[in-house]
Image: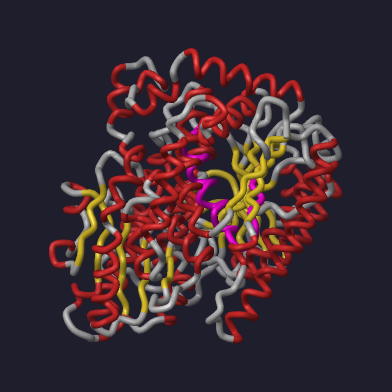
Amino acid sequence: MTAGLPAGYRLPDDLAASVGSALERAAAERWVERCWQKDASLWSSDPEVQARIDARLGWLRVPEEFLDHPEELAAFAAGLRDEGFEAAVLLGMGGSSLAAQVLLQAFGIAEGGMPLYVLDSTDPSAVASVRDACDPARTLFLVSTKSGSTTETLSLLAFFWDAVHHRGGGPVEEHFAAITDAGKSLEAIPHSDDFRSLFLNPPDVGGRFSALTYVGLVPAALLELDLAEILARGVGMAQRCREDGLENPGLVLGLTLGTLARAGRDKLTIWADPSIETLGAWIEQLIAESTGKEGTGIVPVDREPFGAADRYGNDRVFVRFLVGGEATAGGDEATKDEAATEKDGAADSAAWRAESDRLADELEGLGHPIIDLDVPVPEAIGAEFFRWEFATAMAGAVLGINPFDEPNVAESKRNTEEALDEHRRRHALPTRRVLAAAGPLAVVGGRLEPAGAAGHVAGQAAGVSAYSSGPGSDRTVAGELRRHLDQIPPTGYTALQAYIASTPERDDALADIRALMRDRTGRPATAGYGPRFLHSTGQLHKGGTPSGWFLQLVAGHPQDLDIHGAGYTFGTLIEAQAEGDLASLEAHGLPVMRVHLSDDPDAGLAALRVALQAALDLASVGGSPDGAG
């Protein structure tokens, strides 16, 4: 414990003193009171910005307002079971999907609940995997989108609407429900007038602040979770966040994160117990989208593998989520399989705890700030949702930004639509020059070229054989990667942007590459699957501190899927989204390079690991984790 801060906060004396000063300022300027009074001047003096903030502060009252909804939602879930529904698929992106993923991992499916699949990818293999895992005729599709116009979500809606139509099983509309806002948002969702159920959220709650609204609660009801207890934990945390000073968990956390970021510790490294690991992804999108703007921000580093203590630079702060014994204990009625799973999970948690304890102690000894947060039981995730929402609001006040908007998100969307427009005209996406190729890999860069030009690649349409004739093909993949590695900013971070379907094997491959990058460069290594990360870290990448280094990974789609009525496929859509984001990063002058992994992403990732190792052996970066280069 650091003197003057709550238990669990282990900060060096100088940083603890800075946080203490921030607490004194917050008290003198009545930050907590002003937040609860919805005084937008806490974040901006601009009247227009204040008006926009006023329309986004409904999350403060959400836990209490939704306390009377558990019975309604339980009845909805029971009605589905009575009608023979056997599974549910959540179609959503970013804040509309991540809370459900956290709850699904932390609790699993309770007795009487139904399997829940969360689909937040436009990769055709990811879509096909979910389609094949459930019978559309006995599945509920939950369309979750605050705006009602999210391209990915509406594309998935069109696909599964058509799938249900061709599979039979009663009226198509009875297989769909929506979580959205009333008015234009609802009207923008095709067929929504006929959906079996509509769950309309308060319009003044932003998507990433909506975990304790219908966004999280409807999926939780389908899993048969204890909604009343989850909400009660949220209410309890909200009440504590009305207090001043050290008695306010959200205030202390937010002021600490904001103060440390201003002191150069802007890489928030999240270590979560394996049983609640997805909580880190939810926090990642909350922090990145809320603080990454106006050339500042906090960079979340989630699920980065543990490394040697001397490989972490002085731009880090570490937050650990420690699960209590009750969270991993099995019930008396557990089956043998359930007991075995719980035993394996407890073993994983114990091993993780031992390793993180050791590393955290070493890092503290080297002067790194450590924050330990206890999650005593799974239901306490309801409290964490609110703690981090309040903390994010307070961190935004410290950084002097509006944490409730996302000014740069539309850039990639516009660029994606331009790429799709070209596809409609030419029946091909924009193309880029191949710089080097070897085996399954092709390094692609440079300006956009006319569709079909020799030696160019347009993403999903290209096979490995198309790479050999490209201009610059006498150059090496490792050499091109080396030149790109030389562009890592002095106090930057690296970001792998994988526009491929997520699998456990690919998670492991990306984690291995991240560890390599971190250990050899001394810089934080992040990763995200596209297009889902566009709804989480995309705002930070373009609007935050210009310290990111980006490696975009794409692959072919030999088994593509049509999007009903769109005039293009899911493979075309995800490649257009990759192109849109690449163009946006280039427009901001950020270092970005594309690597095509061939039609076999697993082989491509293995080859990329080897190529990066070779490139790092040649590169001038690395060796100094303090960012000296």
* Depth order, front residue of 443/336: 336
* Depth order, front residue of 326/604: 326
Decide if residue 310 is on the left or right side of residue 194: right
Q: Is residue 471 visible?
A: no
Whether residue 518 appears in magenta in the rendering, the answer is: no
Q: Position of residue 44 (x, y in %)?
A: 39, 19
In the orientation shown, which residue stands out farthest toward the front?
332
The image quarter in which residue 309 lies: top right
Q: Residue at x 48, y 24 (%)?
A: 397
Decide if residue 425 is on the left or right side of residue 197: right
* Depth order, front residue of 135/153: 135
Our reading of the magenta stretch's main secondary structure is: helix
- Residues in magenta, as a range: 269-292
Q: Position of residue 266 (x, y in %)?
A: 64, 32
Q: Position of residue 396 (x, y in %)?
A: 48, 28
Looking at the rendered image, the quarter that the C terminus falls into is top right
Q: Is residue 530 visible?
A: yes
Q: In this rendering, is residue 566 above or below 625? A: below
Q: Position of residue 142 (x, y in %)?
A: 31, 66
In the orientation shown, which residue stands out farthest toward the left?
193
Q: Coloring scheme of the render?
A: secondary structure
Q: Residue at x 32, y 58 (%)?
A: 144
Decide if residue 49 is on the left or right side of residue 488: left
Q: Residue at x 36, y 73 (%)?
A: 88
Q: In this rendering, is residue 174 above or below 90? A: below
The image quarter in which residue 625 lies: top right
Looking at the rendered image, the quarter that the N terminus falls into is top right
Whether residue 291 appears in magenta in the rendering, the answer is: yes
Q: In this rendering, is residue 562 above or below 236? A: below
Q: Residue at x 30, y 51 (%)?
A: 66
In the orientation shown, which residue stands out farthest toward the top?
28
